[in-house]
Image (spheres, grey):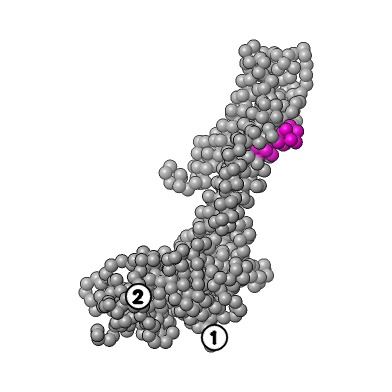
Amino acid sequence: MKRLNPSLIAGGVIVAVIVLMALVSFVWTPYDATLVSPASRLLEPSWSHWFGTDKFGRDILSQIMVGSRTTLFVGVVAVGVAAVIGVPLGILAAMVRRWPSEVIMRANDLLLAFPALLLAIMFGAVFGASTLTAMIAIGIASVPSFARVIRSGALQVMRTEYVLAARAAGRQPFPIALRHVLPNVTSLITVQASVSFAIAVLAEAALSFLGYGTPPPTPSWGRMLQESQEFLFSAPRLAIFPGIAIAIAVLGFNLLGDGLRDRFDPKLEDRR
Amino acid sequence: MNDVLTVRGLSVTVRDTALVSDVDLTVGAGERVGLIGESGSGKSLTALSILGLLPEDVRAGGSVRLDGVDHELVGADERRMSRVRGRDIAMVFQEPMTALNPTMRIGDQITESMLIHRSRTKAAARTAAADLLELVQLPTGTLRAYPHQLSGGQRQRVVLALALANDPALLICDEPTTALDVTVQALVLDLIVRGVVDRSSALLFITHDLAVVATVCERVLVMYGGRVVEAGPVNEVFTRPRHRYTEGLLAASDLESTSRRLTTIPGNVPPAGRFPSGCVFRTRCAHATALCEETPAWTGSETEGFACHHPAGVADA
């Protein structure tokens, strides 16, 4: 059994806690996260409200718990869109002849040069601001990084003798892609997915902060940050708690990605 | 008896550099033919162009015909070629460590190769896979193993089982034992010969190891600089070489230990495209004269002959 590396453990634990928090929020939160109660607005952290309340009297802890659902949802959608488009594109670019491959990769570069947030704002303006449109936009913007990583991995697989042997055995290109190339780049997909997940979480926070992400009243860490702006000096905790939540989530997914990379990459393993 | 494989005037070029020129090669049904030469002599390219598996910017010219296939193999499209590959021609590659997909079980890989050409039903393919493993003397449990659980020799035997799965008319082996240690070599060679003899398949065996050719093959072609320089029955070529290159190769291999010193062929194989005009061997040949600037004509028949202006076994003029 291989030794688990620290970043894999730390990342795994953080991600597990977030997933757990999201699951628990479905059945229980300390208070209703969207319940407005003017009587208890802007309370300091206390035993009854661990993280305090915001300007509408909503419980911050409850909001963060429910907000983790949004965070996971955006990650899954964005990574899903990016992987479903990016992985086949990357494998295709590795398998076709030089010219079509160049066309795919240059189109890819073009998309890579386009700012992800701008694309998301554009989508929001055209299709109306919602978590889903924002995340599809972020997903599309993450396609190039997927396509690149998968292409480089697929190119290596295409050079192996088992692919040559499969061709020598009369295998058609599509089954080769499905049976031989795809299973051998899954580790790359996993690593890229966790890194893209972190990027998507951050992007959702940024978009919600700008008002193009999750519309109220659905709790979102990014929008909590935005709503805290006016109280930045009088009640900084309103910004600190969701800020910490975002930072930890992003850190968690990045650590997980790093840990998985170390575990899958045999070259790094030799050095350890 | 029909010839299984007929290669005429095969040439392989990359951009303007000729890597293989004017290769004629015939393999009869059930015949075992060796193709020998140093690294860079064009042996592997010849094999890959028969299968149409050359890298993207490498082009083949000339003619490759296979008995029972009604179209020309050179320049045939992928769709037609993929029907021929694995069914009529199968290939065993040099490097057993990378020749199997690490994410698939051995059994799945063997049955897959049979299902591609629909030669058997799924259930029949399973049984046939077990039989094939038995043929290459691996335990039936190997079916459920992943490649990383097997040694190099075991993997090469799996690769052989894969290649024999559809009873190909022609089996091409490209240095199948080079990456194995000597004790395993003998077993794998034995299995290859037995496999093709049982199926009366023809064998095209590529190697640089003369001793291996001597045990496996009936007829041999010697390649140098992308050309066939000599051909003939193994006994004939190895005991009475005519081409000066074959002579040098044999002396270096020390099959007959007449010389006490370690004999080498002077100089190195030139890089691709830098072979001299005329006789490709003349820059390294002790017998070369001005005459050798002209390409020597083929002397003898197609199955037995040589291309040399100053053949061995004849007093130097």
Along the viewing direction, whichever of B105 and B177 lies nearer the viewer: B177
| Residue A105 against residue A204 in the figure, above or below | below
Which sits earlier in the primary sequence, circle 2 or circle 1? 1
Which residue is drawn at the image coordinates 77% and 12% (left, top)? Answer: A39
Residues at marks 2 and 1 touching, judged by CB atoms closer than 8 Å: no
Is residue B175 in view from this perspective? no
Q: Amino acid at mark 1?
A: Asn
| Residue that mark 1 sits on | B2
Q: Where in the figure is residue A198, as x and y percent of width and height?
A: 60, 35
* Magenta stretch, main secondary structure class: helix
Quarter of the image that includes the C terminus of chain B: bottom left
In the image: residue B265, left or right of residue B106? left
Query: Which label sits on residue B278?
Result: 2
Q: Tell me the tag on residue B30.
A: none
Q: Residue at x 44, y 76 (%)?
A: B22
Marks 2/1: CA–CA distance: 34 Å
Q: Residue furthest left?
A: B260
Q: Is residue B284 visible?
A: yes
- In magenta, the rendered stretch is A123-139
SS for tag 1?
loop
The question of residue B268 being in magenta is answered with: no
Amino acid, disc 2: Gly
Which quadrant would residue B266 be assigned to in this image?
bottom left
Q: How many marks?
A: 2
Alpha-carbon neighbours of circle 1 within 10 Å: few (<14), some, or many (≥20)? few
Q: Position of residue B257 (x, y in %)?
A: 26, 77
